[in-house]
Amino acid sequence: MAEKNRSIGIKSSEITPKQAYLSRRDFIKAAGVVAGSLTLASCAPASLQAASLPTPANPSLASKTDELGGQVNAFEDITGYNNYYEFTTDKAGVAPLAAKFKTTPWDVEVYGMVNKPKTYALEDLIRLFQPEDRIYRLRCVEAWSMVIPWQGFPLSKLLKEVEPNSDAKFVRFETITRPEEMPGLKNMLYPWPYQEGLRLDEAMNDLTLLATGMYGGELPAQSGGGLRLVVPWKYGFKSIKAVIKIELVSEPPATMWSEIAPNEYGFYSNVNPQVDHPRWSQASERRIGELNRRETLMFNGYAEQVAHLYDGMDLKINY
Ligand code: MTE
């Protein structure tokens, strides 16, 4: 990897020190992950076989840390091994399959219980809302975590434009389906399209991002381009990729994982070290690139910004 980076002119000080760096492949070997069959598999990789991965547009972002001092993960780790079932359930297989997926032009329709429904072109959203840099931790439900430098804008800005009416209580998100480009859609074990949902106040929280880029460049197809939701205090599967529909609704919408396994994946899916997954503990996690487990923080470390959203709620029931 160091060779590859040298050949594209990145200074060695700008990449993760070799000793500190452990690829997702070595990492998972060391951890010996066992995945279930029709359950949400690990977000961490088994091998990095994608042929020609793109390079980070802004390598200096890859040397930054989040507000808790967590090192941003290597670009190759974030873009070479992905959960994206519309392509394949083989994580290393997503990047090569997504290589020809067209992320431009990209439109998103915002509709439902709003005064001003509208279909927006991605470039207009970018012009309107001027994406900013946000370094977020992402905690996978299978207890892996990573730190990613996104570019994006708060979803709240878009929702304010369309003016939710007084019946709007939840937001439903839907991923594009292009069977000719997404071979995983043939797998009828999954209730396509991939859908997710948030309560309206969660959607309006400033942390909730619509990502338009990462590492200072375009959002790669395998990472959710053209447009991806990122909700950093919730498990990774809530961060739905390739969003083409945003619908304001009055009831909690069906979501992909809670439809498949309602006892394992609830609507809220907040990162919560005190509420275990039925089959494993959520008390600790492995940060990609680190050997030792670290304690999982309530709301993935974002409690100050979001804990008030759940005042008075029993989070064991509302998991
Ligand atoms: N969005 C869509 N449309 N399809 C998916 O399969 N997987 C989810 C989430 N968003 C998924 C998705 C899961 S399970 C995780 S952990 C994250 O994306 C993985 O994001 P990453 O591949 O960028 O690490």
Image (tube, rainbow, N blue to C red):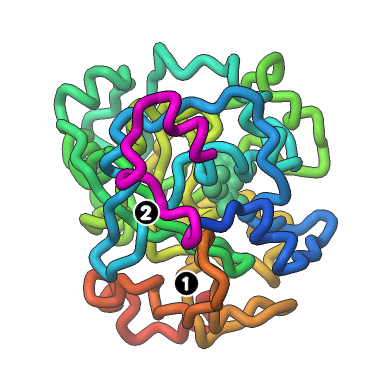
Which residue is under mark 2? 72
Name which residue lies at 45% across and 47% down. 74
**Quadrant into which the C terminus falls:** bottom right
- Whether tag 2 and tag 1 are in contact, CB under 8 A, the answer is no
Percent position (x, y) of residue 141?
59, 65
**Quadrant into which the N terminus falls:** top right
SS label for mark 2: loop
In the image, residue 192 sits, relative to residue 277, either above or below, namely: above
Image quarter for residue 82?
Answer: top right
Q: Is residue 134 highlighted in magenta?
A: no
189 left or right of 180 in image: right
206 left or right of 72 in image: left
Q: CB at mark 1 closer than 8 A to ligand 1?
A: no
Q: Do we see residue 226 in this rendering?
A: yes
Percent position (x, y) of residue 46?
72, 50
Percent position (x, y) of residue 254?
58, 52
Viewer-nearest residue: 271 or 147 = 147
Compare marks 2 and 1 and give the one earlier in the sequence.
2
Image quarter for residue 143?
Answer: bottom right
Which residue is under mark 1? 271
Q: Amino acid at mark 1?
A: Val
Name which residue lies at 63% across and 49% down. 256
Q: Is residue 6 highlighted in magenta?
A: yes
